[in-house]
Image (cartoon, rainbow, N blue to C red):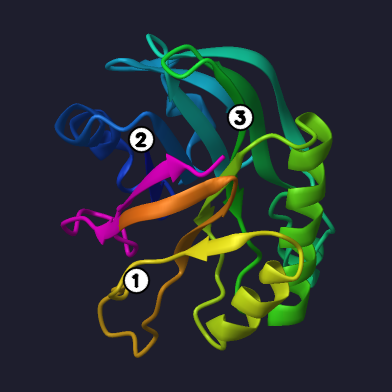
């Protein structure tokens, strides 16, 4: 079993919640988006920072449980640069990755924390970024089981993303209810997802609301091969 928790911190507003979440839910992997890179600790309880972006205002980070995983390689990855990032000056590093050895099972796997471009760009462009991300993950660990979790910013016509990724050998894991809840906003949907290859979905749940406009999401996976 592999427990993966993903949380968009809404420009760092919910950053102080990371350690309580890690303690309460004991994830094996923690994927973070929209963090303040300068405030990200090297350790969160039993989790160790495997990879994270620096020098940008919306950092992406990936933590793994140190007693279970050995990090073999890690990277921050440039994806196709969106119109939003060209105009607003966001970040072209919207993915961080790690190839790890799972000492509990003896397996190796590839992990990613992903943050798709916002609604100022098209769903088609977000799918291009997802394809870029999966290509990077496959290069890091060809043929290995893969999990990428984060804020995909693709709640509208989500079925198109499902079909698109199924043709590429990935399954989309999603919760039963919305993961976005910004006050006075009509926008709702399942923004926070995971894509998997070599795993089966056991459970996906939305956790209680915190300081962010997103809610934390906890996925549970089983190796399928």
Callout 1: few (<14), some (14-19), or many (20+) C-alpha neighbours within 10 Å?
Answer: many
Q: Quadrant of the N terminus?
A: top left
Residue 168 seen by the camera = yes
Which residue in the structure is indicated by mark 1? 180
Residue 1: mark: 2
Q: Return the disc, 1 or 2, that comes first in the chain's sequence.
A: 2
Classify 200 as above or below 105: below
Quarter location, residue 185: bottom left
Residue in the foreground of this view, choosing between 142 and 53? 142
Residue 130 is inside the magenta segment: no
The residue at 51%/46% (across/down) is 199
Determine whether the residue tagged by mark 2 lies in a helix, strand or loop: loop
Mark 1 to mark 3: distance in Å?
29 Å
Q: Quadrant of the C terminus?
A: top right
In the image, the segment drawn in magenta is: 204-225
Residue in the foreground of this view, choosing between 26 and 109? 109
């Amino acid at each position: 079993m592999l427990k993966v928790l993903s949380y968009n911190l809404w420009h760092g507003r919910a950053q102080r919640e990371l350690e309580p979440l890690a303690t309460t839910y004991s994830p094996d992997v923690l994927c973070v988006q929209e963090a303040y890179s300068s405030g990200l600790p090297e350790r969160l309880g039993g989790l160790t920072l495997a990879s994270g972006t620096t020098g940008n205002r919306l950092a992406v980070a990936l933590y793994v449980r140190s007693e279970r995983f050995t990090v073999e390689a890690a990277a921050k990855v440039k994806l196709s640069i969106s119109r939003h990032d060209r105009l607003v000056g966001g970040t072209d590093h919207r993915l961080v990755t790690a190839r790890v050895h799972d000492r509990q099972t003896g397996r190796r796997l590839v992990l990613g924390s992903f943050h798709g471009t916002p609604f100022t760009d098209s769903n088609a462009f977000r799918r291009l970024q997802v394809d870029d991300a999966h290509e990077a993950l496959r290069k890091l660990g060809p043929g290995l089981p893969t999990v990428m979790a984060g804020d995909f910013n693709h709640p509208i016509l989500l079925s198109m993303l499902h079909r698109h990724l199924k043709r590429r050998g990935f399954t989309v894991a999603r919760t039963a209810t919305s993961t976005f809840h910004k006050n006075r906003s009509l926008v709702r949907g399942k923004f926070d997802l995971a894509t998997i290859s070599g795993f089966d979905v056991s459970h996906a749940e939305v956790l209680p609301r915190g300081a962010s406009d997103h809610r934390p999401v906890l996925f549970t996976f089983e190796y399928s091969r």
